[in-house]
Image: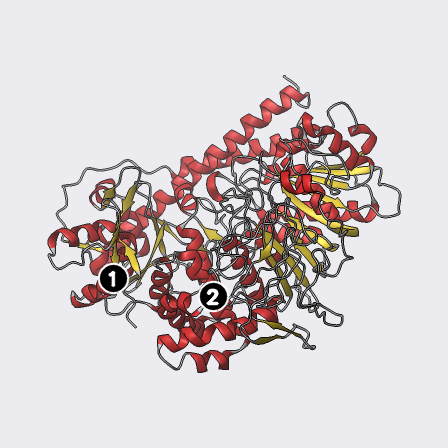
Amino acid sequence: MQDNATEVTAAGIARLAGVGRAAVSNWRRRHADFPKPVGGTETSPSFALAEVETWLRHQGKLAEVPLRERVWQQLAGHPEGPATALVHAGCVLLLIHDRPTVWLDIAAGPDERLAAKLPESLERVIVDRFGTAGWRRGGAPGRGVHRVSGSGRGAAVNSSAAVNSSPGVNGPTAVNPPTPVNGPGGVHSAGSAATVHSPGNPAAVHGADGADTVHSPDGRSTVHTQNAAAGVHTPDSAASVHTQGRAPEVHSQNPAPGVHTPGTGPAPSTTPATPATAATAPPTPRATPALHTPTGPELLPSAPLLRGTAELAAEMGARQTFEFLLGRHLDANPRQYTLTPPDLADLMAHLAGPARTVLDPACGTGALPRAVRARSDQELYVQDGAPELAAVTALRLALHSRAAVRACVGDTLRADAHPDLRADAVLCHPPFNERNWGHDELAYDPRWEYGFPARTESELAWVQHALARLKEGGTAVLLMPPAAASRRSGRRIRADLLRRGALRAVIALPVGAAPPHSLPLHLWILRRPGNVPAAPEVLLTDVGQFAGEGRGGPDWRAVRDAVVEAWSEFDRAGTLRERPGLARSVPVIDLLDDDVDLAPARHLPPPAAADGAEALTAVRERLGETLRLTGDLTPPAVTAAQSARWPLTTIGELARGGALVMRSSGNTAHARVAPENDTHARVPVLTDHDVLSGAAPSGTLPEGDEETVLTEPGDVVVPVLGGGAMARVIDEATAGAALGRNLALLRPDPASLDAWFLAGFLRGTANNRQASSYASTATRLDVRRLQLPRLALDEQRRYGARFRALDEFERSLRRTSRLGDQLVRGMYDGLTDGTVAPD
């Protein structure tokens, strides 16, 4: 089946052909047979991928589309959108991962057979891994379940309808009883059977398409139900048909409303709502399982993508393939998602400690539960208001480990999917500064054990939700905005958290640790108090001093070491020896004033109080040495020379001739790639800012596990955005770093090209100007168009030696500037805090 439905933009065509977007524009103008747009807009058209591939191959501009690129373009151009395509691909990858022989049998026939047979196999693997039956009929993942604001970090759409029913179950519209029935769930389905309770109709609605048998994850006997047109699922920690660790439940064909409560907790009150309540109460949002089995007609347009995904999984592995596609999707839509950086996720998971049951009530793309150390008996509970994020997280976690995954869609504060859960650990990166979090509806919610949060204090609602889902002694780690530690509207709740020993630590992170990067966010560590006296002290830590330069991000190794060391000592002893400027344990009584201000910087002594004068003396000595070195490195007086008229060549010609290899991030052919066991924390990333500033690699790998290009000594790295003339030669200290975004890597053949000669000529201002293209808001460098003179290797080395000396001089100037700034700032601080005398 030809994938004519998949579309690709001009940027995608440029990536396929390895050229800049300006080249694609030129092809459209110069070649009358260039494929015509099939979608998009007049300023940003899209083209049929199959037609583009054919044209590029006919023109000799493309020998064959790389498999990784072909699969990504199929996903990005899917007619139902990339989010739906990603979930379809993830379901197939999970099937390949768990039952590879089943996939081989299904994929042997044509696309129509694949689409017809696949749902049944997907249903089995979904039941096995997630403890919930998918919907045999109904909307595809991400459709039919409305997003509700305040439930996660994905984009949200306000709607009171959170559960959708297919035609044949109480009509085609959403099933939303006006009052809660059976607790937070209220709507029950066993497997693919439909059993819908409505306050006004005590009779259950059943389909009649024959019996169906759904097997529980523990392999026990199951429930035989009648197959309705669609199931409406409940937000229990396991599906209502499947019970973990106890005998299976068999539900009556005609239960009265309110009889069944999903999950393992006690049944709630079955008192029916009064007529007045039923008439006036607003619709109650519902939580539903994150994964629903797509139907054959929904899978048919995805068949070419699924076959390509399986082929890619044979090369990379199922988990790596999904991480690659997810990483590409996140990179292509950076403004749609608020991500938790991997290093921060690792730190939060470490602070939470080892845990068997883990909850993330605002899971986003699943970075936090994925960072938890895996255990054979582990259970991961996640929820998010965006259907595509909840589904992606479920698949991601299932591919990452064998832990039991319980993932749901729904507004966590309004429709908690796991009300009976008592977890060992809760990890949460909640949405910040939400006004519509449920303040009016949740005034009498039992979770507000420490006080009812104000409308402006949504973060304190998440804090109390996390505490309510912890077992006694369990640990919660939440990422919080700094204002939550000091806003007056939250002081009473903060005071009660301190008095009762629930809040154990507040840690101020460096600027740039996580979005929004302009704020120094906080970590709150909380414990659910048991039958022990409340601890009299709380740990306050500020690691803002480890902020990196510019966009490089913090020094995560230093942040982790400082935070873990302080927390470990405090957690063990209940107190901490004071570390000026870094950490101290403060008696709770000292914080219970009118403001209850928990901002660490306001309670820590300045670092200069310990060694201000000695540190400034050391900085001054280093500055003096650097100034002397800079003077020695100053270039000698120049001598005039006649204007040279060299024969020129381009980087593109040198690449085609084999004199150098050109690669970009994510393009791994002929480049050493990071081994599979390398983690995000171990591989530093050389960013475009590092190249421009001459700094050490300071970035971290994105959430996707896409194979990364690793630098080697002698490589030349060039930024492609911003319009600056810059190139950097990789030395032994920088080698091994991963190539960051918006960078091009040139690997010259030492027998043909001198690396310093290459880098020096690439920095010429006129050279960069002629190779740059200009958009409305940015300048992009087409590296292939950069020019070099054709010189003998000995002459190249003569120029290269001069360019290398200039580079050393430039680095010395930068070091001088940094030390000078440090000395000036230290003098101001020392004079103003009294640690340095004025004479």
Binning the other alpha carbons within 10 Å of mark 2 as few (below 14), some (14 to 19) or many (20 upward) gives many
> Is 26 left, or right, of 585 in this rendering?
left
Mark 1: few/some/many CA within 10 Å (<14, 14-19, 20+): some
Determine whether, in the image, residue 370 is placed left or right of residue 765.
Answer: right
Location of residue 276 (image quadrant): top right
For the view shown, which residue lies furthest in the top direction? 839
Could you tell me how far apart the alpha carbons at marks 1 and 2 are, in whole angstroms? Answer: 46 Å
Q: Position of residue 437 (x, y in %)?
A: 60, 38
* Count of marks overlaid on the render: 2
Q: Position of residue 722 (x, y in %)?
A: 33, 41
Expressed as whole percent of the image width and height from the top left, the position of residue 258 reads 71, 55
Q: Which amino acid does label 1 sit on?
A: Ala
Left or right: 631, with 642 as reference point: right
Relative horizontal placement of residue 434, taking residue 106 as reference (left or right): right
Do residues under tags 1 and 2 come within 8 Å of each other at their CB atoms?
Answer: no
Q: Residue 816 carries which label?
A: none
- Amino acid type, mark 2: Pro
First reached walking from the N terminus: tag 1 or tag 2? 2
Colour mapping used in the image: secondary structure
Mark linked to residue 655: 1
Which residue is rendered at x = 68% and y = 45% of the image? Answer: 563
Is 278 above or below relative to 677? above
Residue position for label 2: 294
Q: Is mark 2 on a helix, strand or loop?
A: loop
Where the N terminus falls, by quadrant? bottom left
Secondary structure, mark 1, is helix
Residue located 72% across and 69% down the image: 249
Residue in the image at 72% along x and 61% along y = 356
Residue 480: horizontal and vertical position, in percent? Answer: 63, 39
Residue for point 62% across, 69% down: 402
